[in-house]
Amino acid sequence: MSDTHAALAADRDRLGLRADCANCFGLCCVALPFSASADFAVDKAAGEPCGNLKSDFGCGIHARLRERGFAGCTVFDCFGAGQQVSQTTFGGRDWRRNPGTARQMFDVFPVMRHLHELLWYLTEALSLPAARPVHPDLRRMLDGVERLTGGTADDLLAADLPTLRSEVSALLTRVSELVRAGVPGRRRNHRGADLIGARLRGADLRGANLRGAYLIAADLRGADLRTADLIGADLRDADLRGADLTGGIFLTQPQLDSARGDAETRLPEALSRPAHW
């Protein structure tokens, strides 16, 4: 583990940005809705407990989620929002024994999840040497978001998320420009592009802007994605076998988990090879 990766991991651990299901009241299994599809075997409304949720808030089919039709659960990451809401915002009072908290707790959870996702991106941006010119602004933004995550349920529900996300996005865009400016040659701009099912095998996408691109089921075998900006890119069922994603910025574990890859896929140091590859 490099010093940079170790510092990033320590920062994320300090902020509680890794899911700790043992200290969460199964919030992702209750608060969020899902529809019967390739990702979920059944319909479930927001606020309705999943039929697989056990009395101890564990999942009854955790080891068999994919085979039972719940692949969507395997690619979800709350970035630590679940335990923050359960143990900090609501002080360890669970919604089963304290039903009066349920509605507000379920409303707060997606807000906290958005905030923790922003913290995840901000910590990564602060770990990038090329982004030093904007590190002071990034630190101020991170401190502000962190303070908000420690607020009351009412504070969280009153948060202006659209404005906050816009401000963070502007900073991360600047970070992306600074990092990718160091990549030689032509850098492709596919921001928000519809690349569903695109044939990009062996494509030179080094330093490309793929922010918000739709890469569902795209053939990216052997593609060069080094230092590409992948924030918000939809990689569901994308074929990443043999692709090189080292140095890719703002790529998250859920994005990788939703894609297909193999032992030859090269990953950023902070991410892990999905078990199902």
Image (cartoon, rainbow, N blue to C red):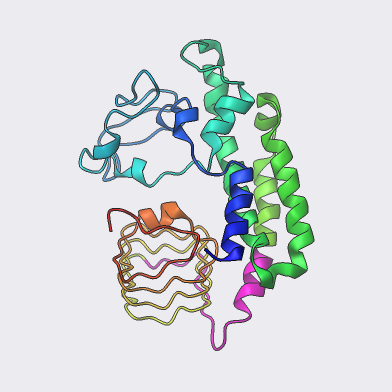
| Quadrant showing the C terminus | bottom left
Q: Seen in the image, is 194 located left or right of residue 240?
A: right
Which residue appears at 23% of the width and 40% of the height? 69
Question: In terms of depth relative to the viewer, which is nearer, 273 or 81?
Answer: 273
Q: Residue furthest bottom?
A: 185
Is residue 37 placed above or below 92 in the rendered structure? below
Q: Residue furthest left?
A: 67
Residue 6 in percent (x, y) is at 58, 58
Residue 159 in percent (x, y) is at 69, 36
- The verdict on residue 216 being magenta is no
Q: Main secondary structure of the magenta part?
A: loop
Quadrant in the picture for residue 2: bottom right
Which residue appears at 75% of the width and 44% of the height? 144
Which residue appears at 35% of the width and 40% of the height? 73
Magenta part of the chain: 172-195
Residue 15 in percent (x, y) is at 63, 43
Is residue 153 placed above or below 136 in the rendered structure? above
- The verdict on residue 191 being magenta is yes
Quadrant in the picture for residue 182: bottom right
Quadrant in the picture for residue 8: bottom right
Q: Seen in the image, is 178 located left or right of residue 5?
A: right
